[in-house]
Image: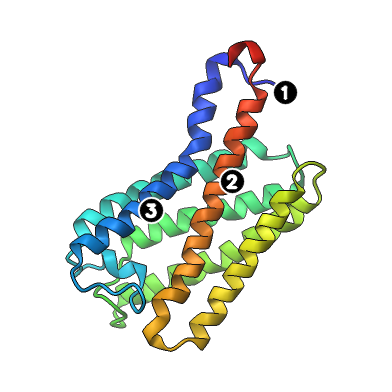
Amino acid sequence: MNIKHGNYKIHRYLSLSGLLGGVFYFSHIIMGRIFYKGYNPLTQAVSDLTALNSPSRNIALIFSVLYGICTVIFVIYFFIYYKGKLNKIVSLGAFSFCIMAVISFLGYTFFPLSTSGYAGTFQDKMHLLVTILVVAFTIISILLFCIGFFRTKNHKYLGIISLCAFIFLATGAMLVNILPKEYFGVAERINIYTVIIYTCILSAWMYKYIIGLLPSSGR
């Protein structure tokens, strides 16, 4: 199936929105650290950068929201475009990934930490609930992707990538409970960066796929 030339740019931009989201995410990390003097990524959570009392909140939040918007756009587009095209398991994984992205974007936007760390307020408890839901749907999504892509004829390498992502997530979750609190930030970043990079890989793969559907005369 070829994409009509008139719609090609729209499809191309939508497929790249996942990569753009990754750029915004790491920009929020970089800018947050610049404006948060004394921030220690080894011990502190990423969410500390946008906590209500954080000195970096205003600037970091801008890039964080842009990341969320781009990621939600991409995962919804990914689900709609590939629904029924590969197999039901991949479609289910994409749907679960959509739920994760929406919960992450809305949850962390409306329920940032009240202060750096965990103060136990209602705001913080909701933030923790969002985190639990995001982790659960992320694990479910990547497991489904792993199984689904392995069952395809031409995309088994994405199954391998999904399996690697799951191993990294499992490792990060294990380290959260094993490493001393002084290294909480390291364990957390293994999980978060795995999801961000995995999304970027899906985005790059989809971009390549979209280009492959464009008629040669229109490239």
Give residue 25's mark.
Answer: 3
Give residue 202's mark.
Answer: 2
Give residue 1's mark.
Answer: 1
Q: Nearer the viewer, mark 2 or mark 1?
A: 2
Between 136 and 178, the one nearer to me in the picture: 178
Question: Measured along the vertical axis of the image, is residue 84 above or below residue 215?
Answer: below
Q: Tags 2 and 3 in contact by the CB under 8 Å rule?
A: no
Q: Residue at coordinates 63% horizontally, 10% vertically from top-left? A: 217
Q: Residue at coordinates 66% horizontally, 24% vertically from top-left? A: 213
Q: Residue 107's x, y, as percent?
A: 39, 61
Between 36 and 86, the one nearer to me in the picture: 36
Mark 1 nearby-residue class (10 Å; few <14, some 14–19, many ≥20): few
Describe the element under mark 3 as helix, strand or loop: helix
Q: Tags 3 and 1 in contact by the CB under 8 Å rule?
A: no
Describe the element under mark 2 as helix, strand or loop: helix
Q: Amino acid at mark 2?
A: Leu
